Amino acid sequence: MQVIAIGGPEGTHAGVRRAARTLGEVVEAVAPLSSDDVVLATRDAAARRVARSARLVLGPERIGVLHVDAPVTAWAVMLAGLCSPGLTASSARVVADEVLSRTVTRVLLSSVASLHRPTPTFRQHAGSYLPRTAFVVDPGRGSAAGSVRRYRGGDMGVPGGGALLVTARSAKPVVPDEADELLPRPPETELADAEPGWSAARWLEASTIEGSLEVAVATALARSYLWGACDACGRAVAETCIFCDIAERRPRPEAGAARKAGVQAGTQAETQGVIS
């Protein structure tokens, strides 16, 4: 499996190829690759449109589109997980979801006046117009709501025990002592040309995975017996096929087992009723 990050910043995992958000560059990035499946990874609407156009041009047989809504540093952690050896394109979605579910992100912003999710309080909104203020934002994970708090010194709340720490930042620091106090350790990966994604003049974003990437990937693959098959292309699929964008419609094994158990229980009850 080859992974191409459309709009990916410099500094992502060495096993990930990067391409700009243009159809021509994506096609050029795919063309020299071997006959292996290719996963086009995206995290914004413009990149997703380009990825789908490239799949139409090149054919869906080997081009999968994996779109996630995640901060850029969390996306970089996810991309590193997709570069684990031995993965197939069919496992890309479950691996991505598992890695992201274990990834913690914190953002330091100079202003939250234009922040919409999570929503700051009126006091925080007004405080954004005062000089030398900063806020720590927890974007949340999945459907979990995030939070906003005033930064009053110390660290950002990034766990120190994660296996991979990825950061991205604006040209100007949010606070003067940014390099010393905010992070638990020097990052393993610094994204050089990451687009901000935050409506603030100065920002610092950091993401780390709880535990190791290897454990997260192994956990995702351990549930492969629950995967179904795509009705269109026949590939193994968990929830939605990244090649065909078709949701899985086959009953999962646990549902079938539950129905079988119910039938057996009903049959046993009927038999006992006849005997009695």
Image (spheres, grey):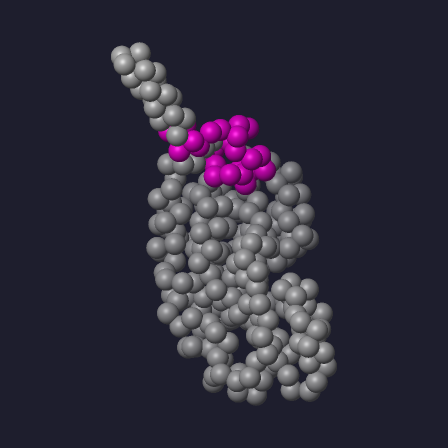
Q: Residue furthest front?
A: 276
Q: Residue at 39%, 54% (x, y): give it.
A: 216
Residue 105 can be seen in this image: yes
User: In the picture, residue 186 is in which quadrant?
Assistant: bottom left
Q: Residue furthest top?
A: 274
User: In the picture, residue 246 is in which quadrant?
Assistant: top right
Please give the count of numbered marks on the rendered protein: 0
Magenta segment: 230-257
Q: Residue at 35%, 56% (x, y): give it.
A: 214
If the image is split into quadrants, where does the N terminus sit? top left
Q: Residue at 35%, 50% (x, y): give it.
A: 218
Closer-to-camera residue (259/55): 259
Q: Residue at 48%, 64% (x, y): give it.
A: 104
Q: Is residue 255 magenta?
A: yes
Measured along the vertical axis of the image, is residue 251 above or below residue 52?
A: above
If the image is split into quadrants, where does the C terminus sit? top left
Q: Main secondary structure of the magenta part?
A: loop
